[in-house]
Image (tube, rainbow, N blue to C red):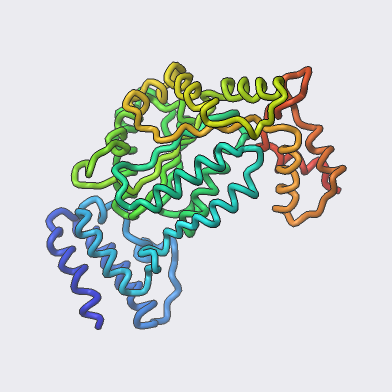
Amino acid sequence: MFVRWLLPVLLALSAEAEFFQFDSISNVSSYYFNYIYCNVWEGECQPNQDDATQQVPTRDLWAGLSQDYTSLLHQWYCSLGQCCDSGDCRITNNITGLARDLQTKLHGQHLAQSVVLKAIQGFINNPESNKPLTLSLHGWSGTGKNFVSRVIADNLYRDGVKSECVRLFIAPFHFPHARLVDTYKGQLREAIRDMVLRCPQTLFIFDEAEKLHPGLIDAIKPYMDHYDNVDGVSYRRAIFLFLSNIGGATINDVALDFWHSGQNREDIGMEDLEHRLRAETMESHGGFAQSELMSGHLIDFFVPFLPLEYRHVKLCARDAYAARGLETDEATLDEVAKAMLYVPKEERLFSAQGCKSIPQRINFFLP
């Protein structure tokens, strides 16, 4: 039985051995020996996450293997009981949970709830998609863009944003210097390629996308295009999320116009925003707008996040208290909501900070 398990991976490694350094082969051999000893032979051991031999081999191994051999290795690994009915225990694709979380935890964002759910569900249910899914999330800070990214990760992956199939890039943090853009290009391409080789379904999140250098986005544009593969690697099961403040003013103007005309906020439709949001993004300054991602029309959905009203801030405060296991009342929630800054100044209609600072704000109202 053991020989049947081990033979495929040995064949894969021997066929590709000329591409590896011996230390790479040693690392992967040590990992799988440790796994078999601890879990198949039930030897006495305590896995140490800081020990390289106890961690799933990543970059050096996968960069040298073709996807055919990666698939073979994956099948062998699954035969050891490390996979689920879905094929990979790291991937859960809980669409029911995603729908529930978007409905109950995301406040004041009926458009984002609908578009994100339909886009993700459609992508998951269509394994033969002809391109990766690319969503661009727009709106003021604190309206829920990062929150939605976490909700997506939490419901598609067992370990959420900590999954080895999920990668977050923050433009000013990961790519701060324009003069190093050529270096960043290589690093970003390699990071995405390695993750796609390691995971059959991946999620890449780019926060503050408007601050990305245009050359940096163009460097990974082929990964989001309608290609069967790029240099032998298929990226069609990847999801790309771009988060940006671009278009926030346009979104707010539309919401304010609806309010002034006496219409319900929930009557705002994608037809009221998507065209204007796309146009403003194309005309804005910054690398995101100037990239081939925009000119090539590779973004599948522009997702608007509306400015939050007083009632939505109260719901965020309620959730923040509940997350700490604390009970509260309407009076306290009103106090928290009233402490926020609202615009326009004369109408105090929209929260200028959204819900982002709520978890810190409630500290001032604790006994």
Q: Nearer the viewer, residue 339 or 148?
A: 148
Residue 245 pos. (x, y %)? 54, 27
What residue is rendered at 75% in x and 33% in y? 310
Q: Can residue 215 be seen from the camera position used here? A: no
**Looking at the image, is 76 positioned above or below residue 41?**
above
**Residue 99 showing in the rendered view:** yes
Q: Position of residue 266 (x, y in %)?
A: 64, 34
Q: Nearer the viewer, residue 251 or 214?
A: 251
- Identify the residue shown where x is 63% and y is 32%: 267
The answer to whether residue 176 is left or right of residue 182 is right
Residue 74, by quadrant, is: bottom left
Residue 31 drawn above or below residue 366? below
Residue 124 % position (x, y): 40, 52
- The structure residue drawn at horizontal position 72% and vertical position 24%, both measured from the top left corner, is 262
Of residues 72 and 52, the one nearer the viewer is 72
Q: Is residue 65 left or right of residue 116?
A: left
Rendered-image quadrant of the N terminus: bottom left
